[in-house]
Each structure stands twice: as C-alpha cells, then as structure tokens.
Image: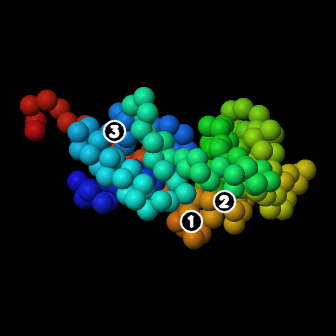
Amino acid sequence: MLMRDEIKAAAEAVLFVRGEQVPIDELVEILDVPLLDLKGIMQELMMEYNEKKCGLQIVFEDYTYLMCTRAEYSDFLARMNKTVQRRLSPAAMETLALIAYQQPVTRAEIESIRGVKSDKVLNHLMDKGLICEAGHKAVLGKPIVYATTQEFLRIFGLAGLKDLPRLEEDKKNVRPINRRRGND
C-alpha cells in the first residue's frame, strides 16, 4: 500500500499525463485506494496547490478531477504562439511501441504485425518528431527503416532504450504439467 504522500504524487502524475478530466472511480482503480481515502487525499492536494499559488490547479467537478492552469494566467497563455498537441491515437501509440521495441523496422514489417496500412500514422509520428528514418534495410528494394528519436526518449522520460519496460517472456516453450486425476 502506498503512503499518503506517494498517493498524492501518483494522483498528480496521472492528472498531469492525462491532461483531461479523470473520473474519481477511475482514480480509485488506478491508485488502488478506497474512495473515502482518495477524496481526503485529493482535497489535501488541491489545498496544497491553492496555498502555493501555483500556475496550475486541480479542480473537482462532476465527480472528476482535472489539472489545469489558473484563470489569472490566461493572458500569458494567450501570448504563446501555439499550443503543442502531444496526444497520440491508439493506432499511433501501437505503432510507436512497435518501433521502439523492434527498431530498426520497415513500414512493411509494421504493417505485417499491425495488420493495417500505417503510412499516415508513420507520417504523423515523424511530424511530431517521435520517430525518424534511420536508413535502409539491406534487402531487395532497400526499404526505409524507422527508429525512435531523442524526443521520444525525452517525452517518455527514458534515459535510453534499455529503460523501456520489459516485455513478457516468450512462453511458447513452456509446457503445462499434464497430471492425471488421482495421481497427485
């Protein structure tokens, strides 16, 4: 079980990354905290943000929590050239994960695994600077291979590709024990 300060920090991280309203029941599930405890913890967190007069605040409305900017800083935000849109579709996340774990990988290899065309998704990921063309594969036709970028590492908080979460071990070679009833 997480300590109270760890729960606050985890809730803060979830709200920050989500960037939109998070239903209270989803937070209960994600943080594995009873509803009444979570309400008290979130109230404390909201008060801490208010006391610090941060540029950010946490708002509770319609049984959801949202981390957002304070209204008094809207003039500064309006001066920004443009808002950076960093959200990725499920298809883009799937493709990005494939590239991260399989790189360098060709478009045909990606499409073979995903089972759908991936041209638009690849272009979208390149436009966002998350992947790049990393050369050509030494096969007939010399197709382009794709790899992740430093921007990918920065955005996902990774020092290097070795910090990617481990995939489950290949369990193909593991055979279940075949026991006959009565012989245990």
Residue at left offset 63%, top offset 64%: 154
Q: Earlier in the sequence, mark 2 or mark 1?
A: 2
Q: Decide: marks 2, 1 in contact (CB < 8 A)?
A: yes
Task: Give SS at disc 2.
Answer: helix
> Taking 73 as reference, is 107 left or right?
right
Amino acid type shown at disc 1: Leu
The number of discs equals 3
Tag 3: amino acid: Glu
**Color style of the picture:** rainbow
Amino acid type, mark 2 = Phe
Determine the CA span between mark 2 and mark 1.
8 Å
Q: In this view of the protein, which residue sits in the foreground, 76 or 89?
A: 76
**In front here: 74 or 116?**
74
> In the rendered image, which quarter is residue 20 located in?
top right
Give the percent coordinates (x, y) of residue 146: 76, 55
Residue 142: percent from left, percent from top = 88, 54
> Which residue position holds label 1?
158
Residue 29 circle label? 3
- Residue 140 vs 153, above or below: the answer is above
Q: Quadrant of residue 139?
A: bottom right
> Which residue is at a point 42% across and 38% down the rendered structure image?
60
Q: Residue at x 23, y 39 (%)?
A: 36
Which numbered circle lies on residue 152? 2
Q: Picture coordinates of residue 53 (x, y %)?
A: 47, 59
Residue 112 in sight: yes
Q: CA distance from mark 1 to mark 3?
A: 26 Å
Dots 2 and 3: beta carbons under 8 Å?
no
